[in-house]
Amino acid sequence: QQQVKQSPQSLIVQKGGIPIINCAYENTAFDYFPWYQQFPGKGPALLIAIRPDVSEKKEGRFTISFNKSAKQFSLHIMDSQPGDSATYFCAAKVDTGRRALTFGSGTRLQVQP
Amino acid sequence: SAVISQKPSRDICQRGTSLTIQCQVDSQVTMMFWYRQQPGQSLTLIATANQGSEATYESGFVIDKFPISRPNLTFSTLTVSNMSPEDSSIYLCSVDPGYTFGSGTRLTVV
């Protein structure tokens, strides 16, 4: 119930492409869904987050699409650049009780020049 | 969002010793979380620390091995006790509200 399943494990795209990373969950009590970007040797950096009453959110080149009925959400990176090469994690949390984030397994993205 | 400072950033420790990791936040926060990230893996929650109460540990993590202090609303420590090479990981703290992360402590046990 606490799991968040993330795919793909790794992804290679050309510069300018639109990588898409997907996550699925089972716990309908989740109410906050963030995405993190992590570079080697650094802590995860919060990129963008969405709540289940919204179907899409854009911040710069990053977009979250959220499908509440399917219990799925995805990250799209528009006009991807080599500097976007990093590991991306989706996460989710409930609003009461245990408020800690549950993380997906991560996607290693490589954007080739 | 809260800015989190973690110390030390990295350390190499001898088997059987203990290391205390500090997490300092630039604003008052309700909850602080400690995570472990093994090489090439995702983040696993160790425990949740509220000010003025005992930390709540996740399955597989115990207080004797990972004692946590939370003396006020901006500071927490995690101790990794009686270390073995299996404890080699990155240890991260995070906070609620905001869910930002510190830069992590890279621990190597030899």
Image (spheres, rainbow, N blue to C red):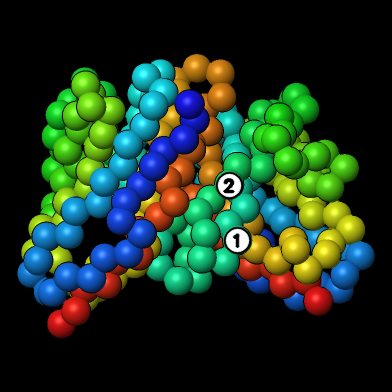
The one of A23 and A101 positioned closer to us in this rendering: A23
Q: State the residue position of label 2.
A: B44
The chain to which mark 2 is attached is B
> Which residue in the structure is indicated by mark 1?
B38
**Residue sitting nearer the eye, B27 or B21:** B21
Q: CA distance from mark 1 to mark 2?
A: 9 Å
Residue depicted at x 89% and y 58%: B82
Q: Is residue B15 left or right of residue B72?
A: right
Residue drawn at point x = 91 percent, y = 65 percent = B16
Q: Nearer the viewer, residue A48 or B87?
A: B87
* Marks 1 and 2, the one that precedes in the sequence: 1
Characterize the local packing of mark 2: few (<14), some (14-19) or many (20 or more) Cα atoms within 10 angstroms: some
Across and down, in percent, residue B35 comes to 60, 48
Image x and y of residue A74, in percent: 23, 43
Q: Which amino acid type is shown beneath numbered disc 1?
A: Gln
Residue at screen point 52% across, 59% down: B41
User: Could you tell me if the residues under marks 1 and 2 are in contact, i.e. CB atoms within 8 Å?
Assistant: yes
Q: Position of residue B46 (x, y in %)?
A: 66, 43
The chain containing the residue under callout 1 comes to: B
Residue A105 is marked as none
